Image (spheres, rainbow, N blue to C red):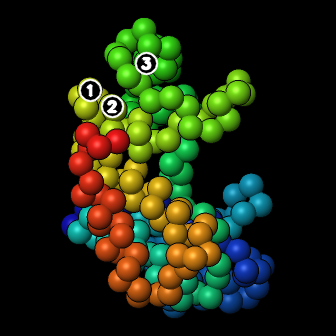
């Protein structure tokens, strides 16, 4: 079975408590490393499962069983030019040429911080463009969609889901099945 790496940023737990690690291990997060990164608690998974979607959904349920709040999922779907280069295994110069329109047509426009010196792109749109231009595999596009979907559910109080809720799995599987050309 393939192995998938991803991280949940959590809160609502004291990382210095005696039972900190135990609560995650007992909840099923025995394949995760716990870390304090930039002051945030990160639950970093290396999970085996049939696909990325199932790995993320099962880990999400296990993290909730630990009695914490999930604040964010990484890898984030908002990316800088440097992050685009890293994820796509391209040079920064190549990405800069894509962004400026000097190489390839129709590269996605920035999604956030458009007026700043460091805009951010939606990795879903960028990965789909790179896939259509033979720079990425389709699995990278699906992974991008799942990452954006899980963050949507985490950050939307109306979509708050409980452990074991199949709605999350169905929704994320649907995100993964959308045609790439629809982006």
Q: Is residue 98 visible?
A: yes
Distance between mark 1 and mark 3 Cα atoms: 11 Å
Q: CA distance from mark 2 to mark 1?
A: 5 Å
Q: Image height check: is 104 above or below 64?
A: above
Residue 3 falls in which quadrant of the image? Answer: bottom left
Query: In the rendered view, does 23 fall on the left or right side of 55?
Result: right
**For residue 129, side relative to residue 32 (left or right):** left
- Residue 138 is situated, as x and y percent measured from the top left of the image, at 24, 45
Mark 2 Cα shell of 10 Å, populated few (<14), some (14-19), many (≥20): many
Q: Tell me where residue 29 appears, x and y as whole percent.
A: 48, 79
Q: Is residue 108 left or right of residue 111?
A: left
> Helix, strand or loop at disc 2?
helix
Please identify the quadrant where the N terminus is shown: bottom left
> Is disc 2 in contact with disc 1, using a CB cutoff of under 8 Å?
yes
Residue drawn at x 23%, y 48% as measured from the top left: 179
Give the residue pinned by disc 1: 133
Residue in front for this viewpoint, 75 or 121: 121
């Amino acid at each position: 079975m393939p192995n998938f790496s991803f991280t949940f940023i959590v809160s609502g737990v004291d990382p210095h408590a005696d039972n900190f690690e135990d609560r995650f291990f007992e909840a099923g997060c025995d394949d995760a490393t716990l870390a304090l990164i930039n002051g945030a608690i990160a639950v970093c998974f290396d999970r085996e499962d049939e696909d990325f979607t199932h790995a993320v959904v099962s880990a999400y349920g296990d993290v909730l069983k630990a009695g914490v709040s999930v604040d964010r999922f990484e890898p984030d779907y908002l990316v800088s030019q440097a992050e685009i280069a890293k994820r796509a295994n391209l040079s920064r110069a190549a990405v800069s040429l894509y962004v400026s329109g000097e190489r390839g047509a129709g590269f996605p426009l920035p999604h956030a911080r458009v007026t700043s010196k460091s805009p951010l792109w939606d990795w879903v749109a960028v990965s789909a463009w790179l896939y259509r231009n033979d720079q990425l595999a389709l699995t990278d596009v699906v992974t991008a969609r799942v990452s954006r979907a899980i963050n949507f559910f985490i950050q939307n109080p109306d979509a708050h889901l409980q452990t074991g809720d199949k709605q999350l799995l169905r929704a994320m599987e649907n995100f993964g099945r959308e045609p790439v050309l629809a982006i």
